[in-house]
Image (cartoon, rainbow, N blue to C red):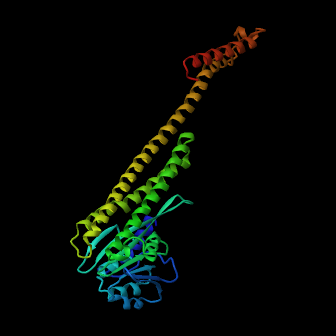
Amino acid sequence: MTLKNRASHKFQKVALPPGSLVYTGKQTMEAVEIHLIDYNGNTFQEKELSKIDDILPFKELPTVTWVNINGLYNIELIEKIGQLFSIHPLILEDILSINQRPKMEEYENILFIVLRILRYHDETNSVESEQVSFILGNNFLFTFQEKPGDVFDPVRARLRQNKGKIRTLGPDYLAYSLIDAIVDNYFLVLEKIGDWIEDLEDRLIQNPTHDILKNLHNLKRELINLRKSVWPLRDLLSGLERSDSPLIQKTTVIYLRDVYDHTIQIIDTIESYRDIVSGMLDTYLSSVSNKMNEIMKVLTIIATIFIPLTFIAGVYGMNFEYMPELHWKWGYPVVWLVMIAIALFMVIFFRKKKWL
């Protein structure tokens, strides 16, 4: 989304009171998808829901209920969720405002978390960022996405196959698992960007063209967007670690600390890539400058060779009546020989000085 589009979406909320529900994105699907997973150590069920009221039977169960919603344009549905689960209007407003920075907010009985899912497109060499919002409660977890497709399939597979201890722990561990999946996907995106950088480095050394400069600027812009998506994540995870909320168990804090370490690695990698791209831009400018200097050197040498030749031709082109060489039989070939000799001498001199 361009800066102009982002600004136009934000203008939709100008002068509205706090908590006003306005979706600032674009409708990318025909119908909202509601996917529910309910589980504990012994039971598991998964289903697609046709309406949000179908969640009510799971509200008071002691099991963990994960509800994933794809599609945010249905404001009535989001508002209904807020009514059923007593969610503050400001949270619902942030869910529908899709340009939020990663953050964590504590409320009386829930935790609200905002993250960014990143996707790398090989065809266009671009990184797409999508907001995903978490609402963590005592026995439930809501996740809100703009469109279908995410990085949570490994977590779903672990739940279905009862691998590890994910089904024996609470919704806070489920939230950790989803956050970990998002952060792990950042490594895959950075790997793709690393390949892109290596390709540009090879092309830059061989032949620095204007197309490479355009790619470098696009790469620099993508790294800036990555930095905006990842840097706040460090503070978010640090806040979850230090949180006194009863929704975060002490056993989960250890795992959150591991995700925090991964985030630091990602930030260091992004900063390294930014330094490399800045160096590549300097290299491109130096290469273009050197190439221009080489061209100017060749043109200068050619001009220097022709300066004395032009002088001789100019002298004998004046055609004064008493110029004796004009009537000399060998005058024309001698002038040619002198001019060729001067040109050869200058070429040999330039080669000896290693200017050619």
**Farthest-out residue, front:** 42
Near-viewer residue (249 or 167): 167
Near-viewer residue (300 or 351): 351
| Number of marks in the rendered image | 0
Say which residue appears at 61% left-offset and 16% top-offset: 348
Near-viewer residue (331 or 291): 291
The percent coordinates of residue 308 (x first, y second) are: 61, 18
Residue 181 figure quarter: bottom left
Is there any visible trace of residue 172 in the rendered image?
Answer: yes
Say which residue appears at 75% left-offset and 14% top-offset: 332
Q: Is residue 78 left or right of residue 306?
A: left
User: Where, quadrant-wise, is the C terminus in this rendering?
Assistant: top right
Say which residue appears at 43% left-offset and 80% top-offset: 69
Above or below for 85 versus 305: below
Is there any visible trace of residue 14 in the rendered image?
Answer: no
The percent coordinates of residue 138 (x first, y second) are: 29, 81
The percent coordinates of residue 215 (x first, y second) are: 51, 52
The percent coordinates of residue 211 (x first, y second) are: 55, 49
**Farthest-out residue, left:** 244
Above or below for 224 versus 35: above
Residue 136 figure quarter: bottom left
**Farthest-out residue, right:** 329
Say which residue appears at 58% left-offset and 16% top-offset: 349
